[in-house]
Amino acid sequence: MSSAILSELQKALGESVSLITDPSITPAYSRDQAPFAHSEPPLAVVIAREIETISKLLAFASAHKIPIVTRGAGSGLAGGANSTADSIVLSLEKMNSILEIDTKNLIARVQAGVINLDLDKAASAHGLAYLPDPASREWSTIGGNVATNAGGMCCVKYGVTSQHVRAMTVVLANGEIVKLGSATKKAVTTLDLASLMIGSEGTLGIIVEITVGLAPRPKNPSTLIATFATITEAARASTELLTFGPSMLEIVDSTTIQAVESWKSLGFESAGSVLILQVDDGTDLNPAVKLCQTMGAIDAMFSDDPADAADLIALRKLAYPALERMGMTLLDDVAVPLTKIADLVLEVEEIAKRNNLTIAVFGHAGDGNLHPTIVFPHGDDEAAKRAAKAFSEIVEAAQSMGGTTSGEHGVGSIKRELAAKEISPKVRELQLQIKHLFDPKNILNPDKKLI
Ligand SMILES: Cc1cc2nc3c(=O)[nH]c(=O)nc-3n(C[C@H](O)[C@H](O)[C@H](O)COP(=O)(O)OP(=O)(O)OC[C@H]3O[C@@H](n4cnc5c(N)ncnc54)[C@H](O)[C@@H]3O)c2cc1C
């Protein structure tokens, strides 16, 4: 694109909006956290502070067919916010105001760039909570969470982001501004276009303002930890434990345990698998301990003391950092039916052997959403190729078990070909027709998510 067009764009946006083209700055906006995903520094970066700026930018981009890559915090793990050399990155990081916390209607209205944890802290001042809790909640944005339909540990009880979104303001590809959804808890008046935006990864519209539901703050959790000799026993026990209404139910395999133990010595080195469960409604966990013992646990115990909770969940919290210490990591994200969790972990062990790699598995047992994490030496190109192959094989294994390509991180640019294997030609055609309806010139995050 010529510099003449960029100065025309600057005119359209107004002099108060900075159009960043400095090559020492633009690369910092060119990618998210996914290793291997292709990215190029964009032509320019626009850091929006007002909806009108976004509207003007999109009207201009539509007229000139300029790709727009929307960015929240860039914490994504699918290459969804990665830019190409012909694109403009639209950053919403400065649209970070909490506009309203309505304690009577139990809702909050926020700009898209509000950090997830900031909203929860603000709600907490009123005894309320914003529940969706991706592990990145200290820095990911509500807009990014909605655009990826982010999950987290408490989703086993409270559901993923979509279950907390009521309404939103969206800037369409041509710059028009629309309001979708309703602030009410129940609403069936229109086709649910807000739901179409949730998880659309920047391909259908720019989400600029969001109304979410808040909940009374859960009680301090009781935490149970159980060790098993095998992943099969732990996975079987995990489905039975769902009857206790857990607000967290995580599983960790032996490779993950060894990675953490070699770093922190938590005392689990002889376990083949560990389950960690929390309840936040005062449920008595004595019967859950008994159930674990009946299901073959080597050891099972729980504590109601909130001070103990951090120690009891340390193994799960340290899983990813422990693996990162061992080398380069490639974090996969698949979901399988609950009864297939052990099968997937065993298949991942085979994939690891076949490709001569270390692959650890941990994740959300209560949702069947697992994160097989491939570890390989930094700077080893051959191992990196084997890792990429193993990454695909894990997804294919999940698909063959009735699972899905991504449980929470999204498709972005790294899983498009893999996702294609899961989608019938008719569904693909319907998706593309919807894309065309919202974005006829294909300027919104082209070549992402939709195949
Ligand atoms: C250490 C770590 C832990 C993580 N843990 C979790 C987890 O537990 N659960 C989970 O689900 N994810 C997790 N993630 C992934 C990531 O944090 C989420 O996908 C998050 O929702 C992305 O938010 P973001 O603001 O960083 O969005 P970005 O990464 O900037 O963007 C993500 C996608 O959304 C689009 N987008 C962003 N904002 C908007 C908007 N306002 N309108 C339209 N499109 C938009 C982008 O174009 C891109 O396609 C983790 C990531 C890391 C690095």
Image: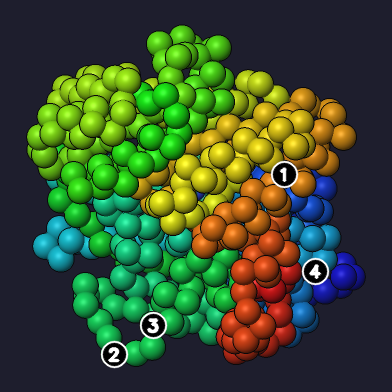
Q: CA distance from mark 1 to mark 4?
A: 43 Å
Q: Which residue is mark 2?
A: 189
> Circle 1: is it few (<14), some (14-19), or many (20+) Cα within 10 Å?
many
The residue depicted at 76 percent of the width and 65 percent of the height is 87
Question: Taking 115 as reference, is 66 left or right?
Answer: right
* C-alpha distance separating marks 3 and 2: 8 Å
From the viewer's perspective, is the residue at label 4 or at label 3 nearer? 3
| Residue type at the position of mark 2 | Thr
Q: Looking at the rendered structure, which numbered label has been put on residue 390?
A: 1
Figure quadrant of residue 414: bottom right
Q: Is residue 226 above or below residue 50?
A: above
The residue lying toward the viewer, choosing from 46 and 106, is: 106
Q: Which quadrant is home to the N terminus?
A: bottom right
Q: Is residue 197 left or right of residue 391?
A: left
Going from N to C along the chain, the mark reached first, 4 or 3, is 4
Q: CA distance from mark 1 to mark 2?
A: 46 Å
Q: Quadrant of the C terminus?
A: bottom right
**Residue 228 in picture, x, y percent from top left:** 38, 26
Q: Residues within 10 Å of mark 2 (few under 14, many from 20)?
A: few
